[in-house]
């Protein structure tokens, strides 16, 4: 909006001036005295007052018109300004939401940082790394993390993880200087994003210390490998997704036997059974202090609570589905018939 004042199309009217009629006092001559006296025609006062009244009324209507126009213009301008301000705020909020820090933002920065010193090799089997090379494999897994308020660790499968392999030869002490350098660089990237170190825990062995960095809605970790066959693992995930996954796993962990404060669970995979009214679920279970893990199997009838069935790493024998509820819940599931030594299904 132009801030310069608008020039009014109406020019200011000059004030009315009343001119006095001076009557000259002149001494009359004899001739003039002889003339009949004729009274001058008086000025009609009604006609003069009416003209002034008309002018005042015109000015009044003009003032009302200008004032009303200005009021409407001002209100429209204010409304437009408020609309623009509201729109600007909404746009800013949308940009802020869209620009929220994501796990990939951090892991991409880690890759760039490492690439500034090392040559990043393609993840091809059989690559013999040199001291200035790294092999980086990426996937969507997140690290194990214990959400506040829960007694177990959990992870979810849509984070961002880098598995980083560096140069190693037999006899090198671990962590090697290359592994330590990687860990230092990854930690520097975390802090550059405003994350702070909040925890350290061990996994599989005391030498495999995992440092946890949190902040900006993220949970990120970095660890040195526990053995010569291991890798540096840098992983990031969204805290909100950790919280959702932990809440969803809680009902299964409650009935899961032999849990400890280092138990780790994944995301429950729930499906409807072939028998109407039944559901089954599978939960990945492991432990920070152990290598490997197993699948925990659960089932339920209707809207009842989840029941633990068993834990397994392979196909079950058909005879293990030995109750009515188990047969209904797992009907049609593949199993091994130990009588015929053939593949079969739960009947």
Image: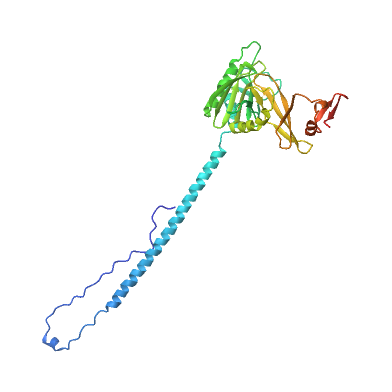
Residue sitting at x 57%, y 39%: 98
Q: Position of residue 12 (x, y in %)?
A: 33, 64
Tell me: residue 260, above or below residue 57: above
Q: Is residue 284 left or right of residue 111?
A: right
Q: Position of residue 147 (x, y in %)?
A: 59, 28
Quadrant in the picture for residue 287 = top right
Between 178 and 257, the one nearer to me in the picture: 257
- Splitting the image into 4 quarters, where does residue 255 fall? top right
Q: How is the image coloured?
A: rainbow
Q: Position of residue 61 (x, y in %)?
A: 38, 67
Percent of width and height locating residue 96: 54, 39
Quadrant of res 250 = top right
- The C terminus - image quarter: top right
Q: Is residue 66 visible?
A: yes
Q: Relative to residue 59, is residue 263 depicted above or below? A: above
- Residue drawn at the location 68% of the way across and 30% of the way down: 252
Residue at far right of view: 340
Give the left or right position of residue 93, taking residue 4 as reference: right
Q: Residue at x 59, y 23 (%)?
A: 222
**Would residue 136 be seen by someone viewing this image from the given angle?**
no
Asked whether 298 or 87 is in front, the reply is: 298
| Image height of 275 relative to 224, above or below | below
């Amino acid at each position: 909006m132009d801030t310069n004042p608008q020039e009014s199309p109406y020019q200011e009217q000059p004030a009315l001036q009343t001119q006095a009629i001076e009557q000259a006092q002149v001494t009359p001559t004899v001739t003039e005295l002889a003339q009949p006296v004729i009274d001058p025609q008086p000025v009609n006062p009604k006609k003069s007052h009416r003209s002034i009244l008309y002018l005042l009324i015109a000015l009044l209507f003009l003032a009302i018109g200008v004032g009303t126009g200005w009021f409407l213009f001002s209100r429209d301008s204010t409304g437009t300004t408020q609309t623009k301000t509201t729109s600007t705020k909404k746009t800013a909020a949308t940009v802020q939401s869209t620009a929220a820090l994501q796990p990939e933002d951090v892991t991409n920065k880690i890759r760039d940082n490492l690439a500034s010193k090392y040559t990043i090799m393609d993840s091809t089997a059989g690559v013999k790394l040199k001291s200035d090379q790294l092999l980086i494999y990426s996937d969507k897994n997140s690290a194990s993390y214990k959400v506040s308020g829960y007694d177990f660790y959990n992870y979810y499968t849509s984070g961002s993880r880098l598995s980083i392999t560096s140069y190693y030869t037999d006899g090198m002490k671990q962590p090697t200087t290359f592994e330590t350098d990687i860990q230092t660089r990854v930690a520097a990237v975390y802090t550059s994003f405003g994350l702070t170190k909040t925890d350290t825990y061990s996994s599989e062995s005391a030498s495999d210390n995992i440092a946890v960095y949190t902040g900006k809605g993220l949970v990120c970790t970095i660890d040195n490998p526990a053995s010569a066959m291991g890798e540096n693992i840098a992983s990031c995930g969204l805290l909100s997704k950790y919280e959702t996954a932990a809440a969803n796993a809680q009902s299964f962990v409650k009935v899961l036997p032999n849990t400890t404060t280092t138990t780790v669970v994944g995301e429950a995979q729930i499906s409807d059974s072939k028998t109407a009214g039944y559901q089954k679920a599978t939960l990945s279970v492991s432990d920070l202090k152990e290598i490997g893990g197993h699948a925990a199997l659960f089932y339920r009838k209707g809207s009842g609570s989840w029941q633990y069935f068993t834990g397994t790493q392979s196909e079950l024998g058909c005879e293990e589905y030995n109750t009515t509820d188990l047969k209904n819940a797992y009907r049609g599931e593949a199993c091994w018939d130990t009588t015929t030594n053939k593949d079969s299904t739960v009947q």
